[in-house]
Image (spheres, helix red, strand yellow):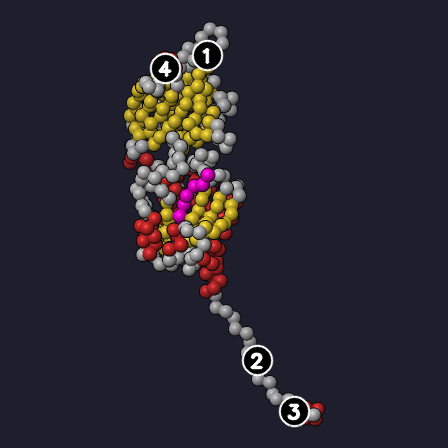
Amino acid sequence: MALTLLVRSPFAAEGQPESGRVQLRIAKHADYFRIVFTADDAIVQKAVLAQSKNSTIRVEFGRTVLIELNRKNADGNPIRLDPAEKRPLEYMKGIFVTAGPQSCSINMESPTETKILKLTSPARLVIDASFSKNDAAQKKEPAPVVEESTIPTNALIIDAGHGGEDKGIHSQSTSEKEITLGIARDITAAVGKKSRTIILTRKGDQSVSLDDRVKIAMGQKGALYISIHTGAGREVVVYTAAKNAYAERSESLAQSIAASLGKELHTPGRFDRLHGLYIAAVPGPSVLIELPSPLLVLYDKKMRDRVVKGIVNGLSVLAKDDAEAAKPQRSAPQQQPQQPLKKKLTDEI
């Protein structure tokens, strides 16, 4: 059963109602979602919440509000919800936000418990919606469908960039370390059924040094190694180390993944060599993938599915190369030895 949080204002003053800006941010924690509306104290203090029978929580304000997300668009401006569109925006996986002239609705799975607080300095309305971990596990969405392809080796190492205190590129609601780990897990789900060894350099929000990441690769010599990061722009760049014993195969892999991701994400995708890249020490074909910035692109489920599909399908290039190399070469038909020609008289001249 879905939960809908509805924010509505019945307190329109006589004449032209006052308008107020309300910033919305949502964060997922271990077993609850925290929803925070930040506004001036007058808006927060007048807010009235009502619970209805159909699992709808209504938050009613005393004036018209403009809902603004704590995220920025491509121009560097905060994303504002247009009440005229009445179209839900996926704020994060499974969380949809819709704005009205005096309302904001948030749709999510029904929580087991909801707590509401009004805080000051700054003034904000905080809603903590708890959920059952068991229920969440039972409702896992299927892994994205990828083209039938063969991963070229029996082992694949997926390196989710950053982790722990190192957030990478981040905003108040998301971070590079969270995005890369989520994609690494999605890739594991997508190709893990093919009975291959899938190794994650980190399985959770932990700090792993570059040296330790390379040591993990050392234990699987010849395995594919893909390191996942996000960049500062909208394009996709796939890097290889400038000096590496597997340079030819790494470059072939990088070019394939760049083209596949560019196709799936409808954005430029290119390959480049980078000096001093730590994956130069990896004993196998290795690439570092730089995805579009999370400050410019929303990494919702659809976006992550496209990323996973682009990466997995890009891996197939080495499989095709290996398959071609493994085919027995047809030997040229043996020629019958030619009989020596009779000498002509001119041969003696």
In the rendered structure, which amino acid carries the disc numbered 1? Glu
Q: Quadrant of residue 301?
A: top left
Q: Which residues are magenta?
A: 224-232
Image quadrant occupied by the C terminus: bottom right
In the rendered structure, which amino acid carries the disc numbered 3? Lys
Asked whether the residues under the numbered discs 4 and 3 touch, taking CB atoms below 8 Å apart as contact, a structural biologist would say no
Q: Residues within 10 Å of mark 2 (few under 14, many from 20)?
A: few
**Residue 18 marker:** 1
For marks 1 and 4, give the one nearer the viewer: 4
- According to the image, label 4 marks what residue? 41
Asked whether the residues under the numbered discs 2 and 1 touch, taking CB atoms below 8 Å apart as contact, a structural biologist would say no
Task: Give the percent coordinates (x, y) of residue 212.
Answer: 31, 50
Is the residue 24 above or below the residue 235 in the image? Answer: above
Q: Which residue is rendered at x = 47% and y = 24% of the image?
A: 81
Q: Residues within 10 Å of mark 3 (few under 14, many from 20)?
A: few
Q: Earlier in the sequence, mark 1 or mark 3?
A: 1
For marks 2 and 3, give the one nearer the viewer: 3
Asked whether the residues under the numbered discs 1 and 4 touch, taking CB atoms below 8 Å apart as contact, a structural biologist would say no
Asked whether the residues under the numbered discs 1 and 3 touch, taking CB atoms below 8 Å apart as contact, a structural biologist would say no
What is the chief secondary structure element of the magenta stretch?
strand
Asked if residue 268 shows in the view, the reply is yes
Q: Earlier in the sequence, mark 2 or mark 1?
A: 1
Q: Residues within 10 Å of mark 1 (few under 14, many from 20)?
A: few
Q: CA distance from mark 4 to mark 3?
A: 112 Å
- According to the image, label 3 marks what residue? 342
- According to the image, label 2 marks what residue? 335
For marks 4 and 2, give the one nearer the viewer: 4
